[in-house]
Image (cartoon, grey):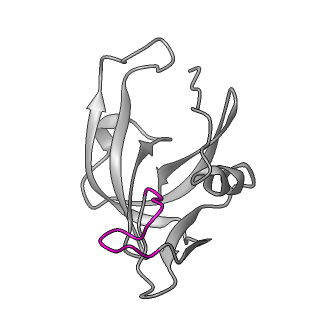
Amino acid sequence: MRRMMTEPSELTAPFWAAATEHRLVVPRSNTDGRYFFPPERCVPGTDSTDWQYVASSGHGKVYTFSVVYRAPSPDFEAPYVLAVVDLEEGWSMLTNVVDCHPEDVSVGMTVEVCFLDVENGVLPVFRPVA
């Protein structure tokens, strides 16, 4: 599969830089400690720009998922699992579940982050915890 990334923005560059080091980071408000994703200039629901990236455990559970059987472009090899993963810290991420058959994925499945090298970067994806 030939997956490519878009160019990181000023807001997302630290996230993607951490991914190249196989680290998962997430924005967290310095005011109330709330995690949020994706990164935004202001903490959601506020006008505060007082936030920073912090390390995430990379452990979570599948909240919901869909198996994609018809890829949107030749860059994706179908079938693949597109999922929302709820992380331990209380934030969610749209991602892929890998290293298992799509029919084995289930809501509530415990997963952990792993990193997939792609043409121009590294993508954080998730795999089932054995």
Magenta segment includes 40: yes
Return the residue nearer the eye: 91 or 13.
Answer: 13
Tell me the quarter of the image containing the N terminus.
top right
Compared with 15, 46 (above or below) is below
Image-quadrant location for residue 7: top right
Residue 96 is at least partly visible in this image = yes
Residue 22, image x, y percentages = 69, 55
In the figure, residue 11 lies in which quadrant? bottom right
- Eyeballing the image, is 73 above or below 88? above
Quick check: 64 left or right of 73? left
**Farthest residue toward the top?**
74
Nearer the observer, 33 or 111: 33
Residue lying at the far right of the rendered structure: 21
Q: Is residue 57 left or right of residue 63?
A: right
> Which picture quadrant has residue 40?
bottom left
Give whichever of 61, 55 is nearer the camera: 55
Specify the segment rendered in magenta.
38-48
Which residue is at 54% across, 56% downward? 113
x then y, percent, for residue 125 = 52, 47
Give the left or right position of residue 120, taking residue 70 as reference: right
Q: Position of residue 78 (x, y in %)?
A: 39, 20
Q: Which residue is at the far bottom?
A: 32
Name the spot of residue 95 as percent of width and height, x first: 43, 45
The residue sitting at 47% across, 11% down in the picture is 74
Q: Nearer the viewer, residue 15 or 48?
A: 48
Identify the residue shown where x is 34% and y is 68%. Answer: 44
Residue 130: tell me if it is visible.
Answer: no
What is the chief secondary structure element of the magenta stretch?
loop
What residue sits 48% from the left and 67% below the top?
59
